[in-house]
Amino acid sequence: MKLRLDRTQVPLLATLVVFVLLYLAAALRYENFFSWTVFVNLLRDNAFLGLTAIGMTFVILSGGIDLSVGAMVGFTSILVAQLAQAHAIHPALAIGTALAAGVAFGAGMGAVIQYFALPPFLVTLAGMFLARGLGFVISLETLTIAHSMYGLIGDFSYHFFPATALLFLGALLVAVYLAHYTPFGRTVYAIGGHEPSALLLGLPVARTKVLIYALSGFCSSLAGVVYTFYTSSGNASAGTMLELDAIAAVVIGGTLLSGGVGYVFGTFIGVLILGVIQTILVFEGTLSSWWTKIVIGLLLLAFILLQRLLQARAHWISKNRR
């Protein structure tokens, strides 16, 4: 029996091959790279990027884009720190407030995109400036969070498993379920594949679009909360340019920029690839951190070209079958 690989699975397979080869090459070159500690640190250090990329995956699957996610990380982190420290509000309540703000912010952008028929690029660009500005209005300085709750989270991370990594992995499992086993996920794919057809099928396109950006807002605000766990502080400038890394992780993970094709698990592998590149530079010790951007840029270009080739091949096959 022959195994047939669907064209939509080729980018995901390419992502897995790149990750395995990159990880094996690093493990052979650097002593102790292939260890449990390094892998756990890979998850912990990239948790807020991973959470942001999960939300971005749903947005790109629908054929949209969200440039506000990095600014939302900074806004959420400084909001939690300000509420917990300056106003002596319990961090759990501060975190709940920040997450609600993220959902409302994302849903607002989704509503503007849907009901005013405006380009997602422009709406979320405006959202990026708004969220970043609101963060700096709250505080221009880094605010340290000194609370017993954060001490408990730090102790758990040290003695058992990083709480930030657990949040990332938990969100990943929920996202995989949403994308592949719920009507919401199927509608997201349908919108990205061909929105007019989704409308003709009677799918709730308008509601789903608003929910997609609300989900992205939730994921990026949760990433901001994870940032406060990671650093025990809030900073309005946190997450600067993170939206570009999130888009890169999604595309390298095999999701088509045109929408309709992709996997949340592929985004997870894309995040790990970015993390492995950064870890390699740390182990090397002599290379500039800017090499991370160079390698990511080359990988991103390669995967965009691969996507283009697959789309051209699919178009050629469809044309010749008529």
Image (cartoon, rainbow, N blue to C red):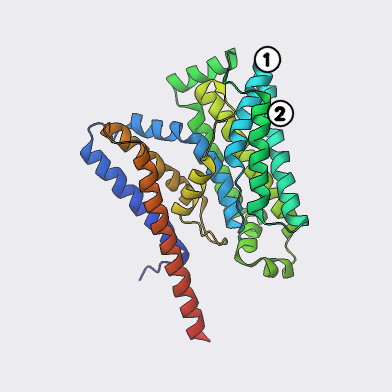
- Where residue 256 sits in the image (x, y, percent)? 51, 60
Kindly identify the residue that appears in the image at 61 percent across and 23 percent down.
140
* Residue 8 falls left or right of residue 2: right
Provide the secondary structure element on which disc 1 rests. Answer: helix
- The number of numbered discs placed on residues in the rendered structure image is 2
Extreme-bottom residue of the structure: 322
Amino acid type at image mark 1: Ala
Residue drawn at point x = 45 percent, y = 26 percent: 161
Relative horizontal placement of residue 40, taking residue 201 as reference (left or right): left
Q: Position of residue 241 (x, y in %)?
A: 52, 40
Neighbour tally class for label 2: few under 14, some 14-19, many 20 plus, Cα within 10 Å: some
Kind of residue sitting beneath label 2: Thr
Q: Which residue is painted at 35% across and 71% down in the image?
A: 2
Labelled disc at residue 86: 1
Which residue occupies the extreme right position in the image? 115
Residue topped by disc 2:
97
